[in-house]
Amino acid sequence: MLNISKNSVKGQINPFLFDSYRMTIPSDQSRKRVRTLLYILLAGFVFLFLPWTQNFRSQGMVTALKPEHRPQTIHSVIPGRIERWYVQEGDFVQKGDTILFISEIKDQYMDPELLERTRLQVDAKELSVRSYEEKIKAQEQQLQALSQNNRLRKEQAQNKLQQANLSVLSDSIMLEAEKVNLTVAERQYERMETLYEEGLKSLTDLEARRIKLQESQAKKISAENKLLSSRNEVISATIELNAIDNDFRDKLAKVNSDKFSALSSQYDAEATVNKLRNELSNYTVRSGMYFVLAPQDGYITKAIQVGLGETIKEGAEIVSIMPQNYSLAVEMYIDPIDLPLVKVGNKIRFIFDGWPAIVFSGWPQLSNGTFGGRVYAIDNFTSTNNQYRLLVVPDPDEDPWPEALRVGSGADGIALLNDVPVWYEIWRQMNGFPPDYYTLKEVREMKNQQK
């Protein structure tokens, strides 16, 4: 083999009888392994350029989209004692159906004729209000009568004062006339006296003149007295006129005082009437709260308060009810770091508890048993678990969610982001870069393409 000797053993010795020789001969299995390795490398290279859908996962639960469609508890508005149940757990009730009856436990509401007695109080106070109204009307009429009477009395007093002034004027003229008469009488007496001294007149004539002089003096004094009396009458008329105004003011003040007192009493009575009406309305409404009614159509799921004769507090939970008609949604929470990756309208894939699924997160089109959804709303503030809440509704472009799905079921959500090559996703993961996400423009373009 090494050509050291010219003697050849070829054809004389079978080399395949030696194991060492057989091991040096190339085999077909080695070639197959090499080809397989090359194929694997080629397939891996091609795999690097396959599209990969970026995503992140989050746990959630099935709920109702609208708040009024979610499970709720029925509360007792007033405290009371359970007297009778009308439903059982699992029963279907319609809106307004009676669930249970409670009786009153507060002594101020235990009177069986409370409504009738309160209504009688309202009627009595209303009559009192009407009485005050009539009293106020009578006082207003009295004010009108006082005003009219005062006007007439003042006219009478003014006329009397005018008469007194005219009497003063007349008496003053009479007094002046008597003064003139007295002056004339004095002069005549003096002349008569001179004539008597000269002997031209008799003593009788002189005495007659003296009598006339005295009469003139008496008439003057009488006229003075009459003038003073007339002046006193003017003063009296003036005082009476002023007294009329003062008396009218006193009476007017008294009537107004009575009127305002009646108004105050009327307002108090009206306030009492309104208060009693309010109490009557409250009692009427409260009497209707003894029957606890179903707020909407649904199923009684659990009785929180049980038994008969048990007392419940105001606002206590009685039963829980699940509405009959509701729109499903998934409530899921994401970390704040993933919030920028999600926009309203983004697609979400779900794996519901109880429904088997084969999932390829990077290739959602190859997954089986998952259901599609779209982001409906995103909270603007973190919840108590320091995560943001998402509401996801069924995707109308995909298969509907299972009919047997119920509120409270678990859901594993896979948020679908942008499509990138596999090599890019590996490179991103190795470098710790954030994933790509849709923009609103891209979402609109996708929707238009789907349409």
Image (spheres, rainbow, N blue to C red):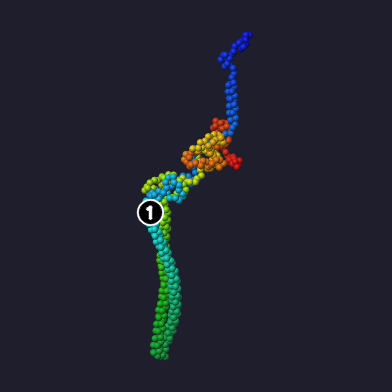
Q: Which residue is mark 1?
A: 109
- The picture places residue 230, in percent across and down from the top left corner, at 42, 77
Regarding residue 294, the answer to whether it shows in the image is yes
Lateral position of residue 240 relative to residue 18, left or right:
left
Regarding residue 320, the answer to whether it shows in the image is no
Q: Quadrant of the C terminus?
A: top right
- The picture places residue 138, in percent across and down from the top left corner, at 42, 67
> Quadrant of the rendered structure where residue 431 is?
top right
Q: Report the label total.
A: 1
Q: Residues within 10 Å of mark 1 (few under 14, many from 20)?
A: some
Q: Quadrant of the N terminus?
A: top right
- The picture places residue 176, in percent across and down from the top left corner, at 44, 80
Lateral position of residue 354 relative to residue 127, left or right:
right
> Quadrant of the rendered structure where residue 207 is?
bottom left
Q: Which amino acid lies under the numbered mark 1 shown in the image of this protein?
A: Tyr
Front-lying residue, 439 or 353: 353
Above or below for 398 versus 33: below
Q: Residue furthest left?
A: 107
Disc 1 element: helix
For image coordinates 39% across by 45% down, the residue present is 306
- The picture places residue 46, in percent across and down from the top left corner, at 60, 30
Q: Residue furthest right?
A: 6
For image coordinates 40% across by 81% down, the residue present is 222
